[in-house]
Amino acid sequence: MKVEAAPVTFSFDGAARNAEELGLQGQLNLAVPSIRNLAAWAGSPLDFPGEGLGPFNLEGMLEMTGAKVALTEAKLAIDEIAGDGLFSVDARGAKPVIKAELNVEQLNVNPYLPPETPEGEGGNGGATAGASGGGTQDAGDWSDEPIDVSALGLLDADLAFNAGGIQFREVKIGQSSLTVLLQDGKLTAELAEMQLYEGSGQGTIVVDGSSGQPAVSADFDLANFQAGPFLSDLADFDRILGTTETKLSVTAAGASQRELVSGLQGDGAVVFRDGAVKGINLAAMMRNISVAAIDQSFDEAEQTDFAELSGTFQIDQGIVSNQDL
């Protein structure tokens, strides 16, 4: 069977059976020259940022038995992203169960991001007008609207994602592995591996909606990454060099954004080793203390070396404090 039209080409080469349950088994091929054009043709243009969502291709072995569908030996490509994996949906029980595994060589998310807004533009241009109206919630304030987590209980899922490399803006991440388990309203996302600027990272995020009220926890541990190139790519900041370790552990529970933020608890730490602060030579400045020396001490060619620079912080009821930096 083959269906061919300007916005999409679909073919299925296999067999169908109509016993106790309808069944299909065979090779599936789907080609879409442009996802955006297909959406416009269907009457639902995509209001999606960036320049991506062009061609999409999918092929694999399809097997369907009643309410259970599986796609194995799958290969897919969207824009410049290519990968392989498997996917299955079992809707025979009380709620659907989704299982999927996706492996990609390189994932560049930049084509799917909105353009970066230059500093000073697009900020809170409407804040003044809103503030003068009286009784209007500040645009930067936290909402008191109840958070609906019921969607977490609609299905169960077991997902795995592996990437040889990821690029977000200028930040470049190496080999990464992520698993997501959703069961009985509790979602656990575990970052088992992330290669980051000559270092590595691990982390876990849990969103538990089983009680009807969200409870969130997050733990991250980044080790031995190079602060200089990482901060330069992340924030165009190149004043600190060194091998870096950072840890973060937070928990929160509450029915609204405001309750989650005000109940945030946790702690963290950051350590820079064998590094330098660029732009200033503190030793030379201390040897020649004067206003002129201080004015002349900020020089791109200068730097202050250090063996270790560290600090810790605590979060209590949404307030971050530091006592040892």
Image: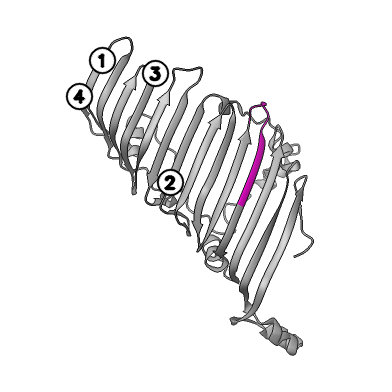
Q: Locate residue 191, reporting x and y percent.
A: 53, 47
Q: Are marks 3 and 4 in contact (CB under 8 Å)?
A: no
Q: Are marks 4 and 1 in contact (CB under 8 Å)?
A: no
Residue beneath the point at 57% across and 34% down: 187
Q: Which residue type does callout 2 highlight?
A: Asn
Q: Which mark is residue 1?
A: 4
Residue that carries the numbered disc 3 in the rendered image: 67
Q: CA distance from mark 3 to mark 1?
A: 14 Å
Q: Helix, strand or loop at disc 4?
A: loop
Residue that carries the numbered disc 1 in the rendered image: 17
Q: Are marks 4 and 2 in contact (CB under 8 Å)?
A: no
N-terminal of the two: label 2 or label 3?
3
N-terminal of the two: label 3 or label 1?
1
| 288 displayed left or right of 219 | right
Answer few, some or many: residues within 10 Å of disc 1's Cα (few below 14, many 20 plus, some between 14 and 19).
few
Q: CA distance from mark 2 to mark 3?
A: 28 Å
Could you tell me which quadrant the N terminus lies in? top left
Residue beneath the point at 52% across and 67% down: 229
Q: Locate residue 211, reporting x and y percent.
A: 67, 26
Could you tell me which quadrant the C terminus lies in? bottom right
N-terminal of the two: label 3 or label 4?
4
Q: Helix, strand or loop at disc 2?
A: strand
Q: CA distance from mark 4 to mark 2?
A: 33 Å
Residue that carries the numbered disc 2 in the rendered image: 162
Q: Locate residue 297, reporting x and y percent.
A: 67, 83
Q: CA distance from mark 3 to mark 4?
A: 21 Å
Q: Which portion, as a residue range, is magenta?
A: 209-220
Residue beneath the point at 61% across and 50% down: 220
Q: Which residue type does callout 4 highlight?
A: Met
Q: Which residue type does callout 1 highlight?
A: Arg
Q: CA distance from mark 2 to mark 1?
A: 35 Å
